[in-house]
Amino acid sequence: MGKICIGICDDQSEIVEELGELVKKVLEEIPFNELRILKSTSPLKILREIKNIDILFLDMDMPEMDGIKAGKEVMLENPACKIIIATAREDRVKEAFFISAFRFITKPFKYEELKEAVITALEETPGDNEIEAFRERVSFNLKERDISMIRAYNGYVEIMVGDNVFRKDISLNALEEQLDDRIFFRINRQYLVNFRHISSYKKNKVVVNNKTFVISVRRHKEFFKKYMEYDLRYS
């Protein structure tokens, strides 16, 4: 498992600290390379960092900004972020559906309930692993989920992240073996595409970064199956 960023937002500082310790305890039981926990009593402050957060524990009732309103902002800025509502207000469970909350845990916290929520959220967040690539001979660690597509050349590949192009001296076949197959698919001999970055799909073509790519005939049936699985589980 790659780098993990977990946000904790509650207007009570003691709750923030308690949750932080419980989350650390959970992650001591599973393998990870690096953990970053962002803690705040202000939803406005946590929203400034939301694009970097994989999982967010969010209180429902906060004076500065209601949890549902904050959750809607999260959905706009980082729809891949898993929101776990943490509150004593069980009467507001139904409202969590408006922000596609991943889980609902109650106060006072039960460790096993929290552990299940964290582990399941991590399992259902593909693309957190990183790969090393180079741009102008400078090394960068790229998160798999940020890679839109990968193109094969003779003995190396070009990796596209936004408008930037990186190089890695490895064959496309070898790199494909390393990548998370829940989000990457080999559409033809030359290209791997990331399901997260497909803006449209029709018949045997996909659009990624405003460019159209053809899916080979022999791969189309498997592509359709994998893409539907991704769409149903992670979108």
Image (cartoon, rainbow, N blue to C red):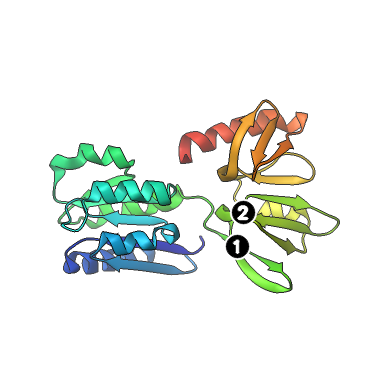
Residue matched to label 2: 147
Name of the residue lying farthest toward the bottom: 138
Residue 186 picture quarter: top right
Is residue 170 shown left or right of residue 68? right
Name of the residue lying farthest toward the top: 203
Residue 21 location in percent, x, y? 27, 68
Q: Residue at x 67, y 28 (%)?
A: 221
Q: Which amino acid does label 2 sit on?
A: Ile
Q: Are marks 2 and 1 in contact (CB under 8 Å)?
A: yes
Vertical comparison of 208 with 43: above or below: above
Residue 199 picture quarter: top right
Residue 41 location in percent, x, y? 23, 65
Q: What residue type is labelled 1?
A: Leu
Spatial separation of the CA atoms under disc 2 and disc 1: 7 Å
The answer to whether residue 221 is seen in the rendering is yes
If you read the primary sequence from the N terminus, does the residue marked by circle 2 or circle 1 appear first?
Answer: 1
Q: Which residue is drawn at 34% across and 45% down?
A: 102
Residue 159 location in percent, x, y? 69, 56
The answer to whether residue 31 is seen in the rendering is no
Residue at disc 2, secondary structure: loop
Q: Residue at x 76, y 33 (%)?
A: 216
Is residue 149 shown left or right of residue 151? left
Residue 99 picture quarter: top left
Label 1 packing within 10 angstroms: few (<14), some (14-19), many (20+) = some
Q: Which residue is drawn at 22% across and 54% down?
A: 65
Label 2 packing within 10 angstroms: few (<14), some (14-19), many (20+) = many
Residue 168 location in percent, x, y? 74, 63
Residue at disc 1, secondary structure: strand
The front one of 176 and 15 is 15
Residue matched to label 1: 142
The front one of 213 and 18 is 213
